[in-house]
Image: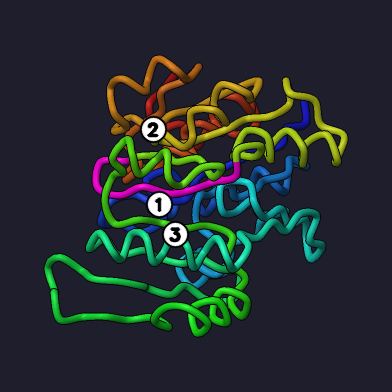
Amino acid sequence: MRYAVFLDIDNTLTGPGVGIPDNNRRAVARARELGHQVFINTGRSLYHIPWTLLGEMRFDGVIAALGASIRYGDTDLRTRLIDPDTVVRLVEYFNGRGVAVYLEGILDVLQCGIFPDQPNRFRGPGTGEALREAAERIRVSKLSIVRPLLPEEEDYIRPLLVYNHKTYSETHFPDCNKAEAMLALASHLGFTREQCIAMGDSANDMEMLEAAGHSVIVGDAREDLKSRAEFIACEARYGSVADGLAHYIPEMREFSVSGR
């Protein structure tokens, strides 16, 4: 069977303290040689993807900013932006609460607000018209807040929705996420759900893992998330992507790390 493979970056394609394990690099290249298509599916905005770290790796496309951006080859299939007035409203709201916000755009990432560990530090365009112009310039597709949101803050941020993580939170559009974007791109290219393999490690990957025909979660993901995946690979630093590809693609058995 020919597969469409969708990979989270942080702590999936990469491993803590090791960057991208060499077996992951070689496995992605081998999968593409065998005729499978491999895509990044990340919460990071297009600008925020660590292209230098990826180096000479080749992918068939990218889903970024929790599904707000979809790119196949050099073609942009989807570009959804948070309107500048909403950006201004939310940044001023959170800055007023002493909370910093990252504007993650297609062309840049800006830090706006007060950093608790550095109270005298303020970066970014400020407020009002200068902030609006900056949002228009960098084309904001996602906001990240430097701590998990309180219930009343989640209510305020609507209609945007929120993923709360242990140390930060991130916004996304209510009608798109990693799963919806994965299935949209797969359908566009003629892949069925059963032909989709998704790999990830965190809360914003769960919809993607559940929507794919086959799902891989890394071995050092949170225990409460592991039951949501079909296959538990090795820890990320040992090459969980290589291990997952070896599990599903018979011609890649030599990349197995866990031996299953």
**Residue that carries the numbered disc 3 in the rendered image:** 90
Q: Secondary structure at mark 1?
A: loop
Which amino acid type corresponds to the residue marked 2 in the rendered image? Val
Residue 30 is left or right of residue 231, and the answer is right
Q: Does the magenta-highlighted stretch encompass residue 204?
A: no
**Residue that carries the numbered disc 2 in the rendered image:** 218
Nearest the viewer among 15 and 149 is 149
Up-down: is 58 above or below 225?
Answer: below
Chain part drawn in magenta = 165-173
- Distance Cα–Cα, label 1 vs label 2: 11 Å
- Distance Cα–Cα, label 2 vs label 3: 34 Å
Residue 171 is left or right of residue 245, and the answer is left
Q: Does the magenta-highlighted stretch encompass residue 170?
A: yes
Residue 14 is labelled as 1
Give residue 105's quadrant in the image.
bottom right
Q: Earlier in the sequence, mark 2 or mark 3?
A: 3
Up-down: is 211 above or below 44?
Answer: above
Which amino acid type corresponds to the residue marked 1 in the rendered image? Thr
Q: Nearer the viewer, mark 1 or mark 3?
A: 3
Horizontal and vertical percent for residue 152? 33, 39
Q: Residues within 10 Å of mark 2 (few under 14, many from 20)?
A: many
